[in-house]
Image (cartoon, rainbow, N blue to C red):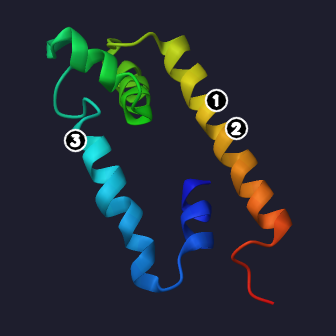
């Protein structure tokens, strides 16, 4: 859904790469992919819990290792909320015809 929202607002092919480059890459590095967020100071742990990538990584980690920084139910709950919100935004944009050519 995030890709569809990105594509709706992109005017050229190069505009599509802005979100992955400047949003997703930093979120991935700060999302606990290469480290456990429990190693971070308390303040940065709180900041990391705003990042949806943290919950995706922890659900994936729990599936492989059976260990996670965040509970699996919490991970799936947060991911479900993000999916519903992104779907709602994408649905709204498509039904209004924003970014669609006639």
Left or right of 68: which side holds 92? right
Mark 1 or mark 3: name the one nearer the start of the chain: 3
Q: Position of residue 71 (x, y in %)?
A: 45, 9
- Farthest residue, direction bottom: 102
Which residue is at the far right? 95
Rendering quarter of residue 6: bottom right
Q: Which residue is mark 2?
A: 84
Q: Nearer the viewer, residue 37 or 11?
A: 11
Residue corresponding to mark 1 = 81
Picture coordinates of residue 3, whole percent (x, y): 54, 61
Of the pair 88 and 55, the residue shown nearer to us: 88
Residue at point 24%, 35% (across, down):
30
45 shown above or below 79: above
Q: Are marks 3 and 2 in contact (CB under 8 Å)?
A: no
Residue depicted at x 39% and y 82%: 14
Q: Position of residue 102 (x, y in %)?
A: 81, 90
Rendered view: 26 above or below 78: below
What residue did someone put label 3 on? 29
Quarter occupied by residue 55 = top left
Label 1, secondary structure: give it: helix
Labelled pair 2, 1 in contact (Cβ < 8 Å):
yes
Q: Which residue is pictured at 34% across the width and 14% down the height?
A: 68
Whichever of labels 3 and 2 marks the residue nearer the N terminus, that label is: 3
For label 3, the crowd category at 10 Å Cα-Cα, with few meaning under 14, some 14 to 19 and many 20 or more, is few
Measured in 3D between alpha carbons, the distance from the residue under mark 1 to the one under mark 3, in whole angstroms, is: 22 Å
Q: Which mark is residue 38?
A: none
């Amino acid at each position: 859904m995030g890709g569809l929202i990105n594509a709706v607002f992109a005017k050229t092919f190069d505009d599509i790469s802005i979100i992955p480059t400047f949003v997703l890459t930093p979120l991935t590095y700060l999302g606990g992919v290469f480290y456990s967020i429990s190693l971070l100071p308390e303040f940065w742990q709180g900041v990391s819990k705003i990042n949806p990538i943290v919950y995706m990584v922890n659900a994936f980690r729990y599936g492989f290792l059976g260990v996670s920084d965040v509970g699996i139910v919490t991970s799936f709950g947060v991911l479900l909320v993000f999916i519903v919100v992104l779907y709602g935004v994408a649905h709204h944009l498509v039904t209004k015809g924003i970014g669609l050519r006639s």
